[in-house]
Image (tube, helix red, strand yellow):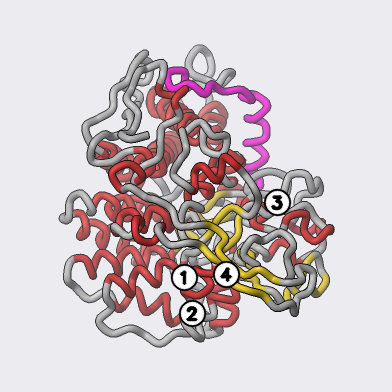
Amino acid sequence: MRHIVKIFLVLLIVSSSCSDTFTDLTPLGSPTSGNFWQSEEDAITAVNGLYEHWGDDHLFGRAFMYLIAASDDILQGRTDAAAAAIRNFEATGQEGRMALIYPRMYTVIQRANNIIKYVPEMNISESLKNRALGEAYFMRGHTYFWLAPRYADNRAGIPIVTEENMEDLSFTRPSSIVDNYRQIESDLLKAAELLPYFTTYSSTDLGRPHKDAAHAILAKTYLYWAHHDASKWASVVTQADMVINSPTDRALINTGNPAEDFASVFYVDNNFSSEYVFSTVSSNERGQILPGVMLENTGWGLYNGWGTFSPTLELYNAFEEGDYRKKATLLEFGDSFTFLGNPRRYFSGNSRTGLQVNKYMHPYRFPEEVHLNPSGNYVTTNLNVPLIRFAEILLLKSEALIMQGQNGDGPLNQVRQRAGLAPKSGATIEDLKQERRVELAAEYADRHLDLIRWGDAEEAYSKPATGRNHFNKTDPDSGFEVYEVWPGRTFNPQIHNVWPIPPNTIAIPGISQNEGW
């Protein structure tokens, strides 16, 4: 993993500038032809360039989380006009918090296209060729997986750019998001065939795409697709089972200690545990900033947290009595925890709700030099943040079984029992919704997209978000009053089920904007 991050740093120097326009997708300085595609080192360098998004503030650092923060579970923790426009569904797509998501993801797609075009003709070993192509197909499918449900629907897909048409000067939008799902399916099936199992990687290659990850993302693709074609629910189960029954022994961390097991999923030591499926790879020098983004602003004067997002009281109240995930997920006033090696009790002058996400706090338990960036100005840690993990695979399967009129108790109850809760009998879709909410809170599983696909967003967002207004914000034992942090919002499914494509990105090729934006 550290090897991947170090190579990525070199690539940043080589290709530090990239275009934000849709038609110029190739980063300046990146290899496309000429004398580059010659050696095994060239192939590896090109493949490593696919992972720039792991260290990008404008993608998985926090930009995608701004879209997720439109949900009822988290909101921005600081005054921010651009973030407010996103949350209120008043964005233009040009706001700095979201404007670079779309073009930068297409940059990843173009890098994958170059690999798919040039690597087959290279005189390199078949094993490396297959792995390079497998990673390229995975990353192209994975990138479209992140773009399509957020920018496309049944009225228009997003442009499909592959090695066959990547040099065209203009692109059109396919008639439906289903066309995008077909492309994602094709790419991920190829990736699953070509990629090795995770357990065959050496320590220097941990974090690369692998066979289980391809099946996992394909299962979730079918989940989204099933809302347009119900026959795809069966495919969710098939692909989920490929992960569940994998020879790599993917499984929940479950030692029978619910007070610790769920929390430990997000420990640095468990970056590549049995629950790992696919994550953003990070080091304390460069990579994933989400833990610092969630941390108290200025970290109580001890470390530079950013305090960007706050959990809502609605999320807090969603946990059942006796659910050990609550303490592992959220900090509230008076909670004891360890920060930079010293015991503390939680209070906050930053959080708008009196709560903080606790899931990603493990790196901050230790002295600064252990897991944190030595430069507090950039808040990376060496905690990898999951994009999809084994618990979600179980919930994908449970939902798909329930939606087919079958019994989804088995996989759902594995998740519940790990949390210290009694099993469900005859679980309903409402039970499944509850379980996804509390198991995957403040993760890239994306509560906002869940509410949209279930048809629940309009009602959920019409209600205000609340929090606790503590009378003394520096006293862990302070009393509080419940207050409205954010008023109810108008969500129109005909418009707001997707986000606006950044206007300057679509201007040159002349593709249409999403309806209503």
SS class of the residue under badge 4? Answer: helix
Disc 3 or 1, which lies upstream in sequence?
3
Q: Which of the 4 image quadrants contains residue 261? A: bottom right
Question: Pointer 2: residues within 10 angstroms few (<14), some, or many (20+)?
Answer: many
Q: Position of residue 214 (x, y in %)?
A: 38, 49
Which residue, given by chain and number where applicable, does mark 3 sit on?
306
Give the Cα distance between marks 4 and 3: 18 Å
Question: Is residue 204 visible to the viewer in this orientation of the structure?
Answer: yes
Q: Position of residue 511 (x, y in %)?
A: 33, 22
Which residue, given by chain and number where applicable, does mark 2 sit on?
419
Disc 1 or 2, which lies upstream in sequence?
2
Which residue, given by chain and number where applicable, does mark 4 sit on?
329
Disc 4 or 2, which lies upstream in sequence?
4
Give the residue type at disc 4. Thr
Q: Which residues are magenta?
A: 1-24
Nearer the camera: disc 3 or disc 2: 3
Which residue, given by chain and number where applicable, does mark 1 sit on?
438
| Residue contact at pointers 3 and 2, CB within 8 angstroms | no
Disc 4 or 1, which lies upstream in sequence?
4
Above or below 411: residue 197: above
Give the residue type at disc 2. Ala
